[in-house]
Structures are given as C-alpha cells and as structure tokens.
Amino acid sequence: VDTQYLNAQDTDREKRSAVGTYAESGLSQYVVPGSAQDTSSLQMSEGAAFPANWDPRYTLFSGVSANPDRRENYQVHKSGPRVPTINTTADEDDYIVNYKDAVTGFVSNGTLPVDAAQGVHSLTDVPVFAQGPCQEMFGGVYNNIDVFFNMAACLGLARSR
C-alpha cells in the first residue's frame, strides 16, 4: 500500500482502490537502504530485525482474521491501541465504525456480527520484532502459538524436556 497515495484520495471507494493486489503489484517499491530515497523504505535497526522507520511510505498487508467493520489506513497507530468501533447505544451492543480510529483511511467491511467490538484471534502467522532481552527469539514471522513459547522461554518459565 502506498500510504501517501492512499491518504491523497478523497472518497472511501478511491481509497479502497488505492490498495493494490498481489496479482497487479509489479516490482516492489521499497528502495535500497542508503540510497537517496531511503527515507520511505522499511529499514531494520542494527542487530535484531527491528524496524528503524515506523512510517514507511510503502506498507504491506496480508492476513486472514475476523474483524468488525472498521476504517483502515495501513499505518502504525502510535497514539495507543486501536478502537475500531464505537457503541451507538447505552444499553445494547450495537457497534459502528469509529471514524477517529483511522481518519485518513476507508471503511473496510468486517466479518463479525455488529455486537462484536473487536477482532478475534486468527490462526495465521504473525510478524514479531523485538529489541532488548531475548531479541534473537523474535525477528521474523512466527506461528502465533510459538510466540507464547518463546515468551515463556525468555522469562525462564519453559519446561525442560
């Protein structure tokens, strides 16, 4: 996703059309670190595979999960956890898209009932990166269950075989 191009679109349909698909992706738009254009590339810090630039212009999204209707802009949310929906009633669970969650994004229809405010766990592999103790255990894409076992090993809670 070219986030700069996506953010420049005016309507939800234009924003949605700005998201590319694999079949039409062409060559990667990531640039070589150290080149004159490297301010928009995904670069890793020295040592562990931890992103040095959290605001790359070009991002990649893929996944299978169950989510509520939400706005999506494919950018890191630095202000805290995402709040994709808001409850429209005081006494019932009736959630609608929270515009403030991703103002520059577009509405992405979810797969959950309207009484569900948050997404649920999927069985997809997840990208995990860390910096600090045990960082060598978290530098890539993992089966999500393995993340638990790596955390337990890092904390010294793993059982010996």
Image: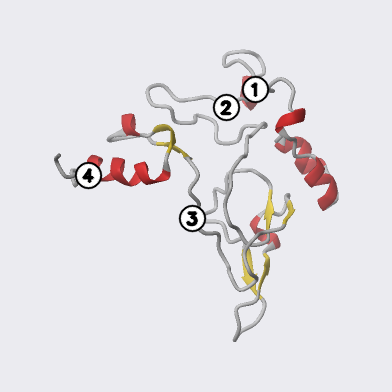
Gap between marks 3 and 1 measured at Cα: 30 Å
Q: What residue sits right under mark 1 in the picture?
A: 30
Dot 1 crowding, Cα within 10 Å, few <14, some 14–19, many 20+: some
Q: Are marks 3 and 2 in contact (CB under 8 Å)?
A: no
Which label's residue is closer to the chain start, 4 or 1? 1
Q: Residue furthest top?
A: 35
The label nearer to you, 3 versus 1, is 3
Kind of residue at badge 1? Tyr
Residue at 57% from the left image edge and 13% from the top image edge: 34
Q: Are marks 2 and 4 in contact (CB under 8 Å)?
A: no
The label nearer to you, 3 versus 2, is 3
| Element assignment for label 4 | loop
Q: What residue sits right under mark 4 in the picture?
A: 155
Can you give x and y, in whole percent of width and height, for residue 147 in the image?
36, 43
Residue at 70% from the left image edge and 36% from the top image edge: 1
Kind of residue at badge 2? Leu
The label nearer to you, 4 versus 3, is 3
| Element assignment for label 1 | loop
